[in-house]
């Protein structure tokens, strides 16, 4: 369910976790490990007043080293894993910059944007 601007600003007035994206020994994203990290952060980090955890995949997640198509897959996986249990911020780190519009439009279409 979409949040109003006021609800969103209130929800973001908290600690934001930016978990590093794990990689396999072969260099691909370890989606199983990433899912476990998300579940851990959402289930064990309790915030005052029952506030929802905010997670972000951004610069410290090495997102700038991931191709645009793989970024889309990673963001969709992450939003589906969170699935309303918290809030998600997608770091847009396109290279080249012209990819930003495509990434934003694509991510807005996710089941759990």
Image (cartoon, helix red, strand yellow):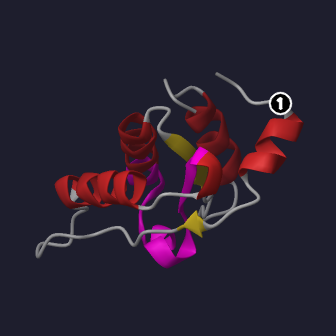
Q: Against 89, is 105 above or below?
A: above
Q: Position of residue 113 (x, y in %)?
A: 58, 33
Magenta-colored span = 50-71
Dot 1 crowding, Cα within 10 Å, few <14, some 14–19, many 20+:
few
Q: Is residue 81 left or right of residue 59?
A: left
Q: Position of residue 78 (x, y in %)?
A: 41, 46
Q: How many numbered discs, if any?
A: 1
Which residue occupies 15% across, 70% down? 24
The secondary structure type at the circle numbered 1 is loop
**Residue 27 in view, yes or no:** yes
Q: Quadrant of residue 61?
A: bottom left
Which residue occupies 63% across, 41% down? 102
Give yes or no for residue 66 being in the magenta stretch. Answer: yes
Which residue occupies 61% across, 59% down? 91
Q: Against 51, is 67 above or below?
A: below
Q: Is residue 106 left or right of residue 21?
A: right
Q: Is residue 106 left or right of residue 66?
A: right
Which residue occupies 48% across, 67% down? 63
Give yes or no for residue 69 being in the magenta stretch. Answer: yes
Q: Quadrant of residue 95?
A: bottom right
**Residue 51 in view, yes or no:** no
Q: Position of residue 10 (x, y in %)?
A: 80, 48
Please state, as top left, top right, bottom left or bottom right, where the N terminus lies in the image.
top right
Q: Quadrant of residue 22?
A: bottom left
Between 42 and 31, the residue placed more toward the observer is 42
Of all residues, the one furthest to the right in this rendering is 6
Q: Which residue is mark 1?
A: 4
């Amino acid at each position: 369910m979409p949040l109003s601007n006021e609800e969103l600003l209130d929800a973001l007035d908290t600690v934001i976790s930016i978990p590093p994206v794990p990689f396999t020994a072969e260099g691909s994203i370890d989606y199983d490990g990433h899912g476990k990290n998300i579940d851990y952060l959402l289930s064990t980090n309790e915030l005052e007043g029952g506030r929802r955890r905010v997670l972000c995949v951004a610069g410290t997640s090495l997102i700038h080293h991931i191709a645009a198509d793989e970024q889309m897959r990673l963001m969709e996986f992450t939003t589906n894993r969170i699935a309303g249990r918290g809030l998600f911020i997608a770091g847009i780190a396109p290279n080249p910059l012209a990819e930003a519009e495509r990434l934003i439009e694509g991510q807005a279409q996710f089941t759990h944007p």
